[in-house]
Image (cartoon, rainbow, N blue to C red):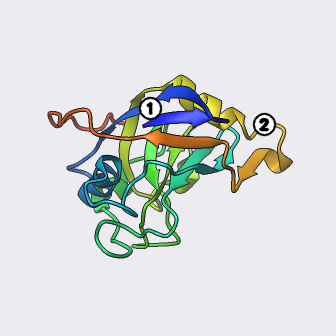
Amino acid sequence: MDVAIDGQLAGRIEAVLFIKESPLAAENLRQFCTGEKGPPFQLKGAYFYRIIDRFIDQTGVHGSTSIYGGQFKDDPGGLKLKHDRPYLLSIANGGPNTNTAHFSITVAPAPHLNGLYVIFGECVSGFDVIQKINALSKGQKNNELLNSQRAQIVETGQLRRGTYLPPPTASK
């Protein structure tokens, strides 16, 4: 994902998807990044519309549910993963089995989300971009920036299909 902040290119965020643990959520994001189904099933042009200081940068495609034609079920393997570090991709939902085209990038551990939100990937580069997005919330009411159009995903894609790597386990 290439991201612009206030109209200026800020950089690229790259992620790996946990296709074995979270096959539904991972494939949903993959196809939203490739845009292979066409509008409205593409992430390009979406804004980070909910940014909470030291918590999350949330984005998604308004008016689109998922590549599956509606809300989709939680991936049990992704629910078992822990929100124990920054830079995880975590699906946003309105309760169990209500996943759509909205997700967050964590910027800190968020254990209160464990078992409630499916983790389906992890960012592997672009940490500075994620932090720049999150910094937009500083100084806002409750250090939260809502309905923002300051950080926009200007390009998306799939760099390559990779070899399966299990998600890192939580440190003890």
Point out the image quarter for the N terminus.
top left
Badge 2 density bin: few <14, some 14–19, many ≥20, Cα 10 Å? some
The alpha-carbon separation of the residues under discs 1 and 2 comes to 21 Å
The image's mark for residue 13 is: 1
Residue 86 appears in view:
no
Name the residue nearer the viewer: 95 or 131: 131
Q: Quadrant of residue 24?
A: bottom left
Q: In the image, what residue occupies the spot 85% across and 49% down?
A: 141
Point out the image quarter for the C terminus.
top left
Name the residue nearer the viewer: 155 or 131: 155
Identify the element where label 1 is drawn: loop
Q: Position of residue 109 (x, y in %)?
A: 55, 39
Q: Residue furthest bottom?
A: 70
Q: Position of residue 153 (x, y in %)?
A: 50, 42
Is 10 located above or below residue 113 in the figure? above
Q: Residue furthest left?
A: 163
Identify the element where label 2 is drawn: loop
Residue type (three-letter) at the residue carrying disc 1: Ile
Q: In the image, what residue occupies the spot 27% across and 45% down?
A: 18
Disc 2: which residue: 138
Marks 1 and 2, the one that precedes in the sequence: 1
Is 107 located above or below residue 110 in the figure? above
Q: Position of residue 10 (x, y in %)?
A: 56, 27
Residue type (three-letter) at the residue carrying disc 2: Lys
Q: Position of residue 139 (x, y in %)?
A: 84, 38
